Amino acid sequence: MASVLIADDNRDLVAILSGRFRAHHFQVFEARDGAEALEVARAERPDAIILDVMMPELNGYQVCRSLRSDSTLADVAIVILTAKDSEADKFWGAEVGADLFLTKPVDPAGVVSEVRRLLGLA
Amino acid sequence: MITAYDIALWLGYIFGGAAALLIVYTLGRRLLARILVSRLQRRVRDIEAIIQRHRSTHYAEMDRLLFQLGEVADIAAVEAALDSHLERSARAERKALKKLYSALGLVQRYLGRLRSAPRWTDRAQAAHALGRLGAVEAIPALVDALRDPHEDAHGVKLAAAQALTEMRAVEAVPLLLEQLSERDEWASPRIAEILVGFGERALPHLVESLDAEAHANLRVWAAQIIGRIGHPSAVSALLVHVRDRSQHVRMSVAEALGHLRDRRAVDDLVGVALNDPVAAVRAEAARALGRIGDPAVLRQLVELLGDPDYWTRLRAIEAIEAIRPDDVSALDAALRDPSAEVRSRAAVALERLGTLRARVEALKSDERADVDRARRTLVEMGRAGLVESILSFLEHPDFRVRARVADALGDIGELRAIDSLVALLDDDMWPVRTRAVEAIEKLRAPGAVRLLLPALSDPEETVRAAVASAIRVLGPQEDRATLSRLLAIFDTDNAAVRCSVVEAVGHVERGAVERILKRALVDPNADVRIRAVGAIGERRARAKWLDALVAALADPNTRVRAAAAHGLARLGSAQALSSLLDHVDTVDRTFREAITDALATFSVEVAADLVDPSATLETTLAAVWTLGKTGEAAAVEVLRPLAGHGEAPVRAAVAGALAKLSPHPDVESTLASLLSDRNERVRAAAVNAIGRIGAVAQGPRLLERLDDPDAFVRNRAAISLGLLGGDPAADRLEAIAAAGDDPAARAFAVVGLALAGRLRSAVAALGDPELRREVAQVIRREPDSVQDRFGRVLQLDESSSRGLGGLEPEALGLHYVETLKNHQDPAQRAAAVEAIGALETGHYAELLIDAIKTDPDATVRRLAVEALGAAGRDDLEVTQALADALRDPSPEIPVTAARALERCPDRRHNRALLRCFTRRRDDLDAAAANALAAANADAPADFVDELMGHRDEAILSGGAVVLGRIGDPKATPLLTSWLRSGSPPLRAAATRALGAMGTVEAKARVMEALSDPAEPVRLSALEALAHFPGADMVDAAKDLRRDPSVEVRTALARLLGASRQTAAVPMMAALSRDPAEPVRTEAMIALLSFGDGDAVEQFNDLFQEQPTTVQAQLRALGGDHPAVAALAQLARDSRRRSARVAAIQALGRLGWGTLERLTDALHDPAAAVRVAAVEVLAWRDDPDVEAALDGMLEDPHPKVRDAVRRRRLTVMSDEEST
C-alpha cells in the first residue's frame, strides 16, 4: 500500500485530502507544521509528501530542502501546495527539489491523480 | 741673491711658456687635421665623381676604373668613397662593386679587419661592408664573429648577423647549415633566421640536412627552418623523420609539419608522433594537428587528454579548440584535470568556443538535469579561472540565470565575487536574493555577517531564514549591533530562524542572551532545545546552568537528552557525574551512547567502579563501552577479567571495547582468547575486532574461523581476513567465492577478496548476477570504513561502493573503460585493465588493443596484452595487436605478447615472431618459439618454406628450434642443409632440432655432428643424442672422451650417466680419471646416477683417488640431489646384496649415511649389509644412532655385533686420547 504525508496547517484541507487518498487505498500521515512534517517523514518514510509552503515552525521550502538532503528520503515524491502563484515561488519550489508545484485552491481529486502519476500508479 | 720672488717669477715664465706652446701645438694639430680631412674629402669627392661616371656606364670599363683609382694612391680615400657608394648602392650594382673591392684588395682587408681589428666599430663596419658586398668567402669569418666567445660587443655580432642576412647568396646556404651542427644558443637562432630568409631556395639543402645522421643539432634546426619557410614540397621529407631516432628531431619535425598545415601529415602525426614515448613529441604533434585543423583527428586528440604529461594535455586542448568541435564534452572533462594549468586552458577554450554563454543560457531550463550539468560546468570553469566572465552574467535579464549563477559563485569559492553578490541582495526577485545570501555564506568572506545584516529585514521569509542560517554557519557573533539584530528576530514562528539565532549568539555571556537561552530551553521545537543545550555546554560560565542541563536529561526528545549529557561532560563536576550515573542503565541507544561518551571523559576509575557483580547487565555493558571510549591503557586491565564474564553480551562488548584500546600488548592476546569463546556472538565480535585493529599475527587463527560452526562468525571472518590481507587468506576466500552452496558465504568471501586487493577475482565473481545481488546487500550493511575500502579497491564511486548499484558487469565495465581512457594515474589504469581482463573481455577487445597501442605506461600495455591473450580470441584484429606488441620497446611486453600468441595461434604473424629471434633474448626466444610451434604445428611444410626465404642467422636458428618443437620429419632436409652452414649457432640449433625428430636419418646426422669442429655444435649433438638411447649411442660418443673441450667431456659424462647402457660404465670410470676436475666430478656423479651396483662400486673404488677438491664437491651434493636419491633407493631396493653394500658405503662417503636413510639397512636380511650400515653409522655422533646401534648388539650375526663393539672401542679410545 502506498503512503502519503500531508503537511498543512489548514486542518480542513488536510481532512479533505486525507479522505481522498484513503479512498484510493493510501496510508495517510498528517502533520500540522513543518517540524512535525519532518519528524513524521523521517519516522514513517512515506512514498509521497504534500507540503504547504506557509506553515509554522518550518515552511514548506525548508522542509523540502531538508528532505532532499537526507539520502534516505531523497527519492520520495514531493508536491508543494501554495496560495502563491508567482514565477519566483514556482522557481524556488523546483530549486529546493519539489517534483510538483500546485497552486491553491486545488482540486483534491487532481492532487490524488498527480500523486498517483508521480508514483507510477496511474 | 736669488729671492723667492725671483724663483716664483721664473717659474711663472716657464709654466706660461709651456702653456703657450701647448696651445700652439694643439691649434696646429687641429689645423693640420682639418687640412688633411679637407684634402681627404676633396679626394673622396674626386673619387666619387670617378665612380659616378663609371656607374652611369654600368662599370663597363672596370679596368680603367681600377687604373684611375690606383692613380689616386690613397687607399683610405678610395675606401671611404667606395663605402659611401656601397651604402647607397642598389642590390644589382653590388656585384660590380664586389669585383672592384676584391680587385683593390679591400675584401681581404675587411676580412682581416673583421677578424682582428682592435676597435669593435671597425670590426662591425667590416662585417657590414662584407654583407653589403655579398662576399660569400666571408661567411666563415662572419659566423665566427657570431659565436666568438670573446666578443663582448653585440654590435659586431649583430652586424655579422645582418651581413649574413643581407648576403642572400644561395652558395651561403651549405656554409650556414654547416654552422648549425654545433650548439650555440646565441648564434644558431640567428643563423636559422638568416636561412629562413633564403626561403624556398634553401629547401634542397635543408632537406638534405635532415638526413645528416651524425648531426642531430643540424637536423633539428633544418626541420624548424623548413617549417618556418612553410613550403609544401618539404612535407614528404619531413614525414620520413617522424620516426627519427632523435627525440629533438622528431619534436622539430612535428612542429614543422604543424607550420606547413598540410593534411598529408595527419596520418603520421596521429599514428606515430601522438604515440611517441617522449611527451614533448606528443605535445608538439598535438599542436601540429591543431594547426592542420582536420576534424577527423578529434578522437585521437580527445584521447590525448588522458596523457600522463600535462603539457601534452595542454597542447591537446589547444588543438581541439583550433578544430572547433560541436561536441565539447572532452573539454568539459578537462575541467577536472589534475593540473591547474590544464583546467585553466580548458576553461579558456570553452569560453572562446562559446560554451560558457551556452551553459549560462541553459540555466534557464526547467529540466533539472540540464540545469545541474550547466551549473557543474560553470563551477568548474569558475574554479579554472573564469570568475570575471561568470560575474558578468549576474546582470542577466532572466532572474533564474542570476539566481543560479549566484549559486554557482558560492561553490566556485572566489572572494572576488563578494561585491557583486552583495549588490545582488537588492535584486527584485527574492530567489536571487536568497541564492546571493547562500553564496556569501559559502564564501565565508571576512565581515560577511555585517554585509548580510540588512537582509534580516528582507520582506521574504525565505531570505531571512537564509540569512539566519548563514550567520549561524559563519560562526558565533559578538558584535553588539549584530547581536541585537539577531535577538530581535528570535520572536518568529520559524523554528529554523530560532535555531540559527541560538547557535549564533548562544555562547555570548550577556543577560539578553541568557534570557533567550532560557526561552529556547523550553521551546516547543526540539531542534531549538538541542541547540540551546549545546550552546550552554559551550559557555564559559556553564556551571550555573547545571540544573538546566540536569533537567534536560529528562527531556522527552532523545537528542535533547544526548546534548545534555555532552553538556554535563563538559561541566565535569561531581554533580554532573552523579546525574549522568543516574541514567547509566538507560536502554535508549542514542542516549546510552551519549551517557557513555560523557562518562568516558571523567576517568577509567568511574567506569571501573560500575563493574560490580551486583550491577545490572545494562550497567555492566555501559561500563564496558565507557572503558573502550576512554582510550586509556589502564582500561585494558579492567576489561581483561571481563573477557571471562558470565554474560555473553558483556564478553562481546569487551571485544569491541578492546579494539578501541589497541595498540596495547594485552589486547591482541585477549581478543585471540575470545576467538574460541563458546558463544558465537562473542567469537564474531572478536573476529571483527581483530580485523579492525589489523592484528596480522592472528591471521592463521582467523583462517580457522572460516570453518566456524556458526555462519555469522564465518562471514565476519571473511571480512576481517580481507582487511588483514595476505595470500593465504585471499587464496582461501577465492576458493569459497568460487564454489560453495551458501550464496551469502560466497558474497562475504567476494567482499573479503576485494578488501584483500584481489581485484581480478572479485570482479570475476561479480559476473554472477545472483552473487552480485548478495554482495550488494553485504556491502550495504558494512561500516563506512569497509565500504570505502571496498570502493577504493574496485575503483567505484561512492554511490556504487555503498551498495546502491553499479556492480553489474556492464556498469563495472563502463567504469573501468572510463578509468583506462581518462585516468592520469598509471596504477589506476593498470588496475582497470586487470579488472577488464576479469570481465567478459570480448566486449573490450578494441579498448585493450587501443591501450596496447597508445598507453604511455609499460605496465598498462603489458597487462592489456595479457588480458587480450587470456581471452584466447584468434580474430585478426586481436592477433594483429598482439603481433604489433612484439615490437614494443619495453622488454617485458614482447615476451608477454609472444606467450599470448601461443594461446591465439595465427600463422599470419610468423614474420613478426621470427623477428623476435633477432633480439637475442633467451626469454623472448623461448616464448616466440612456443608461439611459432603452436601456430605452425598443423602445417610444418609451409613453415619450412617460409624459413627458406630468410637469411638472418638468428631467425634461422630460432626457426630450427621451432622445427625441433614441432618434430615433423619433413623438416629434416632443411635442418640437414643447415648443418653445412658456416654459422656454428645455426648448426648447433639444427642439430638439437634433428635430435627432436627422432628418425633414423636425423640420428645419423646428429652422430656426424659429434665431430663438428665447433664446440657448441658438439655439445648440441651430445644433447640431441639423448633422444637416441642405445649401445650405438655410447659407441658413437666414445671418441669424445678425448675431446679438447672440457665442456664437451663434462657433457659426455652427464650423457653417459643418463644412458643406462652397461658399456657406458668403463667410459665413466675412464672420465673419472680425466685431467680436468669438472669432468672427474661429473663422471663420478654419473656413476652414482647410473643406478647400478657395479657403477657404484666403481665410484667407491675411484673415490679415494680423487683430489680433495673433487671429493669436497661430491660431499657437497645435497640430500635431494638425484644421485644421492638414486643411491638411497639402491641401498633400499636393490636385489643384489653387493649393490646394497656399495650404495651404503657410497652414502657414507658422501656424508649422507644418516640413520633415517639406513634404518632399513640395519634390518636388512643380509648381514654384510647390516655390517656396512653399522660401519657407516659408527661415525655419527648422535644419541639416536647410539641407541639404534645398542640395539644391534642383539643382532643374531656375530659380524654385526663385532662391528658395533669395534665402534664402541673406537669411541672409547677417542675419548681417552681426548
Image (tube, coloured by chain):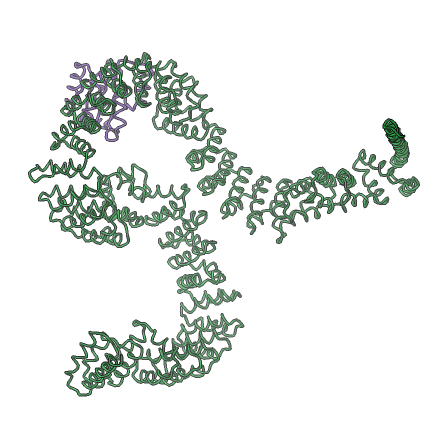
Chain colours: A purple, B green
Judged left or right of residue B718, residue B946 is right
Residue B722's x, y, as percent?
26, 48
Quarter of the image with the N terminus of chain B is top right
Choose between B119 and B486: the one closer to the eye.
B119
Which quarter of the rendering shows the C terminus of chain B?
Answer: bottom left
Closer-to-camera residue (B346/B161): B161
> Looking at this rendering, what residue extends furthest in the front direction?
B1
Percent from the top left, x then y, of residue B136? 76, 45
**Outermost residue toward the bottom?**
B1198
Residue B535 percent location from the top left of the image: 24, 23
Instruction: Determine if residue B1100 is in view.
Output: yes
Q: Is residue B209 left or right of residue B139?
A: left
Residue B593 occupies which quadrant of the picture? top left
| Residue situated in front as seen by the camera: B935 or B1087 | B1087
Q: Is residue B910 above or below residue A74?
A: below
Quadrant hosting residue B1181 = bottom left
* Residue A44 visible (yes or no): no
Across the whole image, how many numbered discs are drawn on residues? 0
Residue ID at (34%, 80%): B1087
Looking at the picture, tell me which residue is in the foreground, B294 or B202: B202
Measured as percent of width and height from the top left, residue B984 is found at 51, 72
